[in-house]
Image (cartoon, rainbow, N blue to C red):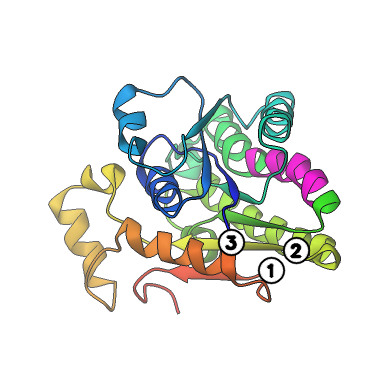
Amino acid sequence: MSKVCFITGSSRGIGLAIAKDLAKQGHQVILNSRSPLDESVLDQFKDAPKPVGQMIGDVSDFDTAKQLIDSIKEEYGRLDVLINNAGITWDNLMIRMKEEEFDRVIKTNLKGTFNTCRFASSIMLRQRAGCIINMTSVVGITGNIGQTNYAASKAGVIGLTKSLAKELASRSITVNAIAPGFIETGMTDQLSDKVKEATLNNIPLKRMGQVEDICRCVNYLIDATYVTGQVLEVNGGLHM
C-alpha cells in the first residue's frame, strides 16, 4: 500500500537515496531541505509513479517544523512514515570547541528530530498507525575523537527513539533508529586516502557501506510492525 513519507534532509546523500528508493516503489515522497531544491535533484524523480512533494524549511526551528508537518497533513491528509535524516557535523576537539559549534550540532541533529517527532506524533496517534525512523550514527554508540558534539547529538537521538517508542506503542506506531557506519557519500568522498585506509582496516567487512544498504533497512523497518525501540546498526562490523 502506498504510504505518505516525509524525509528530512533529503536533498543529497543518504536522505536523497532513501527518497528515491521509496518513490520508485510508488510511495508518496515529500522531500525536505532548508533551501529550495535544485532542478537536478527534482529531475531524479521524474519517472516516479507519483509526483514528488517538497516542504522547504529548517526542521531545527520548532515553529517551522510545526508548519511543515501541518502542511503535509493539509495537503496529503495523513503522514505514514517520518524519516529524520537532517543532520550536520562541526568537528573539533573539546578543548577547542566553541559554544556555537556544540549548540548548532545539537540543535540540528537532536532538537530537529524532537521537533518533527513532536508534531508527527499527534497525526499518527489519531491515525492509530505510523512509522518513525531516526537516523543516528555508530559514533552515537562508540564516541569519536573530535566529535563530542556530534556523538552527543546522535546518542541523544537513541534515547529519544527508545522513549518515544514506549509512548506510542499502544497506538501501533513504531519508532526505531538506524545507526550507519561509514557509508559512501559525497561526505566520505572528501576523506583523504590515508583516512580511508585507516577506516577500512577497522571494518571487518573491509569495505564502506552503500546507500542501498541503508535503503534496505528503511524498507525493513517500515514493514516490520512488531519491531520498535531498536537501533539497527549498519556498519560492516565496525561495532558489534
**What amino acid is found at the position of numbered circle 3 in the picture?**
Ala
Q: Quadrant of the C terminus?
A: bottom left
Estimate how packed mark 1 is, as few (under 14), some (14 to 19) or many (20 or more) residues with alpha carbons within 10 Å: many
Q: Is residue 2 a member of the stretch shown in magenta?
A: no
Q: Is residue 73 left or right of residue 133?
A: right
For the stretch drawn in magenta, the main secondary structure is helix
Q: Describe the element under mark 2 as helix, strand or loop.
A: helix
**Which residue, as the protein is rendered here, is positioned at the far left?**
193
Decide: few, some or many residues near mark 3? Use Cα within 10 Å; few <14, some 14-19, many ≥20. many
Q: Which residue is mark 2?
A: 165
Rounded to the nearest angstrom, the CA distance separating label 3 from label 1 is 8 Å
Q: Residue at x 15, y 55 (%)?
A: 194
Give the residue drawn at x 77%, y 43%.
118
Q: Residue at x 39, y 50 (%)?
A: 24
Q: Is residue 178 above or below residue 54?
A: below
176 over 101 or under it: above or below? below
Q: Alpha-carbon neighbours of circle 2 within 10 Å: few (<14), some, or many (≥20)?
A: many
At x 68% / y 76%, what residue is drawn? 226
Q: Which residue in the protein does label 1 denote?
A: 229
Q: Residue 237 placed where, x, y %?
A: 37, 77
- Quarter occupied by the N terminus: bottom right
Q: Is residue 149 visible?
A: yes
What secondary structure is found at the residue carrying circle 3? strand
Pointer 2 and pointer 3: residues touching (CB < 8 Å)?
Answer: no
Magenta-highlighted residues:
112-124
Residue type marked 2: Ala
Q: Are marks 1 and 2 in contact (CB under 8 Å)?
A: yes
Mark 1 element type: loop
Ranked by sequence position, the earlier of labels 1 and 2 is 2
Give residue 101's position: percent from left, percent from top: 52, 32
Q: CA distance from mark 1 to mark 2?
A: 5 Å
